[in-house]
Image (cartoon, rainbow, N blue to C red):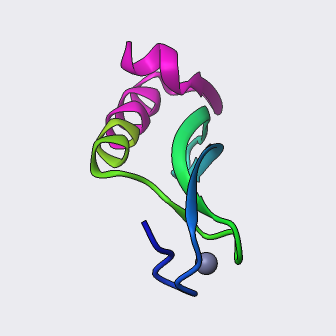
Amino acid sequence: MKCFKCKGDMRQDYTTFVTDTGDSCIVVRHVPCLQCDTCGEIAYSGEVTENLEKIVKAAKQALTEVAVVKYPDAVA
Ligand SMILES: [Zn+2]
C-alpha cells in the first residue's frame, strides 16, 4: 500500500489511538496500522476502524475520565 499523502511505502506497524470525546479521554494501545516510512502518516484498515468505533462506544459508556484499552484484548 502507498501513502495517500506522499506516495511513500506504508508498512505494518502498531500505534496508540487516542481520542477525546469531551467527557472522557480514550486511549487504545497496540492498534495495528499502516505507517508511512517517509512522512509518518498512519492509516487503519476498514476492520480496525470499525473495531475502534466499537471500543470507543463501549469505553464512553463506562463513564470514566480516562479509559485505557488494549486493542488485542478488546477485539478478542
Ligand atoms: Zn507518506
Q: Quadrant of ligand 1?
A: bottom right
Q: Position of residue 73 (x, y in %)?
A: 49, 14
Left or right for 6, reference 4: right
**Magenta segment includes 45:** no
- The boundaries of the magenta stretch are 53-76
Q: Quadrant of residue 70?
A: top right
Rendered residue at 59%/41% (across/down): 24
Left or right for 51, reference 71: left
Task: Check the image and report above or below for 17 versus 68.
Answer: below
Q: Quadrant of residue 25?
A: top right
Rendered residue at 71%/76% (across/down): 38
Q: Quadrant of residue 57?
A: top left
Asked whether 62 or 73 is in front, the reply is 73
Q: Position of residue 39 (x, y in %)?
A: 70, 77
Task: Check the image and report above or below for 43 versus 57.
Answer: below
Q: If the image is split into quadrants, where does the N terminus sit?
A: bottom left
Left or right for 64, reference 38: left
**Magenta segment includes 59:** yes
Q: Position of residue 5 (x, y in %)?
A: 53, 85
Asked whether 24 or 12 is in front, the reply is 12
Asked whether 6 or 58 is in front, the reply is 6
The residue positioned farthest toward the bottom in the image shown: 6
Q: If the image is split into quadrants, where does the C terminus sit?
A: top left
Q: How many marks?
A: 0
Rendered residue at 43%/38% (across/down): 56
Task: Check the image and report above or below for 15 versus 28.
Answer: below
